[in-house]
Amino acid sequence: MQRLDIPVVSYSTRTAAAMAEHGFGLAADGVWRDGAGRSFAAALSGLPAPSAHVRTWGCQMNEADAEAMDGQLQTLGFAPAPAPEAADLLLLNTCAVRGTAAEHALGEIGRLKRLKAERPGLLLGVCGCLTQMPETVAYLREHAPHVDLIFGTNNLHDLPDLLRRAYRDEAQTVDIWQQAPETVEELPVRRAPGVKAWVNVIYGCDKFCTYCIVPTTRGRERSRRPGDVLAELEGLAAAGYREVTLLGQNVNSYGHDLGAGYDFADLLRDAALVPGLRWIRYTTSHPRDFTPRMVETIAAHPKLCEHFHLPVQSGSDRVLRWMNRGYTRAQYLELVGLVRRLLPLASITTDLIVGFPRETEEDFLQTLELVAEVGYDNAFTFQYSPRAGTPAARWEDPIAPEVKKDRLDRLNALQYATSRRRNEALVGSLQEVLIEGASRKDAGVYAARTRTNRLVLTPARPGSENHFGRMRITAAQTWTLHGELEAVEAGA
Ligand code: SAH
Ligand code: SF4
Ligand code: F3S
C-alpha cells in the first residue's frame, strides 16, 4: 500500500515555533532557555538543575527511541541522572511483545509507587509499546495514579509539550496516538558513547503476523526518505561513527510505501558508498521481503556485514500459514541457500516460537528438522505468548504449558549444541573485530564484535577501545568466543 501522503516535518523548526510561544529560544549551549537564562527543564520543574533518566525494555527500536528522548531531554536542560532512583524525571520506555516483557514493566511501575511517595517532586512517565495497548492505559488510570504522564511510540517527538502539560496538570496526563500522522526528521539524539549508531530507516509494521502486537504498538509502515537517511549517515560518519545499524521492524520492506521504486537493496548500496563508515548492519529482516537483489548487494559491498538475521518462527508450513508469515518452509530454505552460496562465511540467526495454538508434535518436529538443516549460528527462542487484540489470542490454545516448556527445552538443546559447534569451527581463524572496551563482567577483559556480530572476549588492551583490529580466535563457548588481539588499527 502506498502512503505517499504522510508529511515529513522538521523537529527543530516545529519545536522552535512552540518554544518561542512560551518565551524560550535555543541558547549557544544547545539548551532551550528563557530571557533570564533559565532552562525549559528548570522552569517546568522549579528545580535549578533537574535530572532525567529513561529506562528501556525491548528491542533496538525502543533503544533508538530512548536515544531520541534522551536527546530531547538534553536540549530541554535535563542533566543525565546519576542513578535512576535519583532522577527528577523518570520515563519507563516499555515493551509489549510478550507477557513477560509487559509484566516486568508493570511490576516496576508498581514498585515506583513508594519512591513517588517519598519524593513527590519526581515526575514519573510511562511510554513505549505497552502504552499503545488500550488495556494498559485503562489499567494505569485505575491502578497507578502515581504515574504522571502516559504517552506512546507515535508522539515521543512531542516530549517538550507532553512534559509541559504533565508538570502543569494535577491529573494524570494521557496522550496516545494510534498512528503517526507525520514522519519527524532532525530529532536531537543522544547516542551511547562509542563509534556505533542506530539509524531508523522505517517505522511501524504492516505484516500483521497473527501472534504479534507490534503492528498495534508501532502503527503502519512508513519509510524515511532515502535522502534523509543518507544525510544522517553522512553526519554520523563526519562525527566519527564507524558502524551503523539500519533499523526497522521489517527493513526489507523499506521504500515500498514511498512509491519511488527505491528499495532496501538501493538503500544498502547507497549506505555502503558513504565515506567514513566501515561496517553497516541492519535489523530486523522479514524473509518474505528479502529479495535476491538484497543478498547480492550485501555480497558485493564489503562494508555490508555478512550477518543475516532471518526470523523463521516455525518449520511447519501449516503453522507458518496460521501465523500469516507469507512464506513457506521451501521458500525460506531457498533464501538460506542463496545466502550460503553467495556468502559462505555469513552467519545466519533466527527467531523461533514454539507452542503456537494448535501446533502439534509433528509441526514441532518440522521446526527441529529445519533448525538442524540450516545450522543457525544463534537463535532467539520463545514460547508463544498470547497478546490481547491479536487474532491468535482469540484462538483455542489446547497445548498444555508443560508441553510448550518441553518443546522449548528440546529446541534450545539442539540450538545450543549448534551454536557451540559453529563457534568451535572458528577456533584458529583470524577475524576482523571492532573492540568495544571493558566487558560487562570484568574490567580486565575486553569485549569485541566480529563482522558477524559474535562476541569475542580478550585480555584488556587499554587504548584499543573503539578501534578495529584483528583477532585470532583461541577458544569457543556456546555464546562467546575468546581471542588474542594480533593487531589494532590506528584511528577509530
Ligand atoms: N519484526 C521482527 C520481530 C519483532 S518481535 C520479525 O518479524 O522478525 C521479535 C520476536 O519476538 C519475533 O520474531 C517473534 O519470534 C517473537 N514474538 C513476537 N510476538 C510473540 C508472541 N506473541 N509470543 C512469543 N514470541 C513472540
Ligand atoms: Fe510482528 Fe510480524 Fe511485524 Fe515482525 S513482521 S513485527 S513478527 S507483525
Ligand atoms: Fe517490544 Fe515494541 Fe520492540 S513491543 S520488541 S519494544 S517494537
Image (tube, helix red, strand yellow):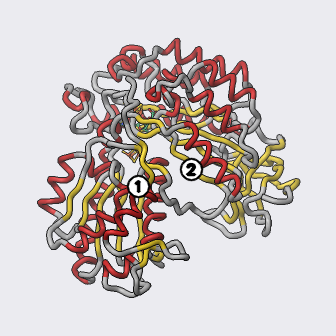
Mark 2 or mark 1, which has the lower sequence index?
1
Q: Amino acid at mark 1?
A: Trp
Q: Tell me, for residue 57, which label it has, or none.
A: 1
Q: On the image, numbered disc 2 is attached to which residue? A: 198
Instruction: Please give left or right for residue 293 compared with residue 401 in the image.
Output: right
Q: Residue at x 57, y 16 (%)?
A: 333
Q: Tell me, for residue 115, which label it has, or none.
A: none
Q: Position of residue 439 (x, y in %)?
A: 65, 62
Secondary structure of residue under mark 2: strand
Note whether ligand 3 is within 8 Å of mark 1. Answer: yes
Q: Nearer the viewer, residue 425 or 56?
A: 56
Q: Nearer the viewer, residue 449 or 45?
A: 45
Q: Residue at x 21, y 26 (%)?
A: 395
Q: Position of residue 466 (x, y in %)?
A: 73, 60
Q: Nearer the viewer, residue 235 or 417?
A: 235
Q: Position of residue 52 (x, y in %)?
A: 41, 73
Quadrant of the rendered image holding ligand 2: top left
